[in-house]
Amino acid sequence: MNIVSIRGLWVCYRTHPVLEDINLDLEEGDFLGLIGPNGGGKSTLIKVMLGLIKPDRGTVLIFGRSPKDARGQIGYMPQKTLFDQSFPVKALEVVLMGRYSRVGLLRRYGREDRDAAMRALEAVGMGGHAEREIGSLSGGEQQRVFVARSLVSDPRLLLLDEPTSGVDSAQQTEFYDLLSHLNRDMGIAIVLVSHDITAVSTHVKKIACLNQRLYYHGSGELAREDIEKAYGCPVEMIAHGTPHRVLRRHD
Amino acid sequence: MIELQIDFLQYDFMRSALAAGLVASVLCSIIGIYVILNKIVFISDGIAHAAFGGIGFGYLLGMDPLGFGIASAVLTALGIGTVSSRSRVSEDTAIGVFLATGMALGIIFMSLSKGYAKDLYGYLFGNILAVTWNDVSLILALTLSVLILVFLLYKEFLILSFDPAYAEAIGLPVQRLRLLLLCMVAFSVVVLIKIVGIIMVIALLTIPGAISRQHMKSITGIMAGSALLGAVFVTAGLMVSYLLNVPSGATIILTAAVVFFLSIALTR
């Protein structure tokens, strides 16, 4: 069974289509990079997969169920969380927020939830910072805490929406290494939204380009024409031979 | 000092005023921190002013103004949320409209009944000395209800306050929680009008929490700290107003404001 199965998906804003006839399948263990220009519908597609936006046409199944029913098995990390840097909350409490889908309304977090939160912090290398206030951590450390928050419900699918914005390049590299570890060693499927083609291409297994339409061949390669069609203009591409290439070899 | 205390508490109206003030401090500390963290200070102020429409209407009918005040405050809380989410009116514009409309209605209603000037003054600037033991038990009941709600929904309100976008994504009933929070604000604000009046209600909700936040690192710590500060402000304000024979509501707020500015100056 596919973990994500999207068929003929259309989403319109008033009369203007934002997503046009999207088809996408993801299997267990996939690591998909989703690139595309701003306003191309990347965040909209993520929100559809979370059940926050209803499709105008088409079907979306996550783990064979409606996105809303599958929410407990999805970990989500939004675009750079804009929170009050002096908000009185500890790293551990932020991670616990991710247990909400399991604990439910009105119930309190139990020992099991706290243990899971500690494990999630340790998994992202932040175990020693559990009691620190979130605002006292560096940008990269905060980002790790938010990854822990998306991991704490033991999801089988992670949706990351531009997770590296506002983080310096050294921390970005560490961050991508962390994602590779989660994908390879913990078997979590990941959809990573980004506009940084170069960074994404060196880490993901499959890549898709979205600008209203989805350009995707179920592989780690995209044709130059696809990317140019998606971006609507010629794109200066730097194709890396290693560890693998986004662009097919061409003359 | 001891003599002053005895002197000060020999009147029953002073004892009920102090009791009302102390219970209100607890109420303000719980609601206030959420008002601050959710940045809904202006909404809360709008609700307080709009409550005046209902108060005036109740006054005109010769019925309990507080009940009508609560009704119009809750309607305003729901109205601001609905208008700003459904039309091209931004939230702060909607607040401005509701605030002024409520005040205007209140003034018209009150002016239609005779001899309103004294009572009008009381609603605008508060009169804690006119608080009855009945009022005290009403404030106590409301404080207990708010305590229970916040105890039950602590984790939900924390997620909502910290990161509403994420809250929505993980299936938290964000809109309903926000309306519940606004309704709690509406109830609290109307009850507080008795003590410091419509104009100054927002200060009692925000100042103790704002000071406490500079020194405490957890939400429960901030709540406890601001309840304590509120109690000190109310007691000191009442004593000073008694000694100098100046309005109690304004004295309480000024006491709080002085400590607020001192706290900022000292933590720099």
Image (cartoon, coloured by chain):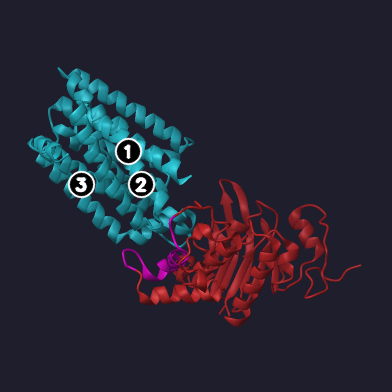
Chain colours: A red, B cyan
Task: Decide which of tag 1 and tag 2 comes sooner along the chain.
Answer: 2
Q: Chain of mark 2?
A: B
Residue A104 within the magenta-colored segment of the rendering: yes
Residue A30 within the magenta-colored segment of the rendering: no
Q: Residue at x 83, y 73 (%)?
A: A241
Q: Position of residue A8 (x, y in %)?
A: 60, 63
Q: Nearer the viewer, residue A110 or B112?
A: A110
Q: Residues within 10 Å of mark 3 (few under 14, many from 20)?
A: many
Q: What label sits on residue B256 in the rendered view?
A: 1
Q: Position of residue A121 (x, y in %)?
A: 51, 72
Query: Picture quarter containing residue A244?
Result: bottom right
Query: Picture quarter containing residue B71?
Result: top left
Q: Residue at x 30, y 44 (%)?
A: B185
Q: Report the amino acid beneath label 3.
A: Val
Q: From where the camera sits, is residue A131 visible? A: yes
In the image, is residue A155 above or below residue A52? Answer: below
Task: Decide which of tag 1 and tag 3 comes sooner along the chain.
Answer: 3
Using the numbered discs, state the Cα–Cα distance from disc 1 to disc 2 in whole angstroms. Answer: 11 Å
Q: Chain of mark 3?
A: B
What are the residue bounds of the magenta stretch?
Answer: A88-108
Q: Report the amino acid beneath label 2.
A: Gly
Disc 1 is placed on an element classified as: helix
Say which residue label 3 marks.
Answer: B23
Q: Report the amino acid beneath label 1.
A: Ala
Task: Decide which of tag 2 and tag 3 comes sooner along the chain.
Answer: 3
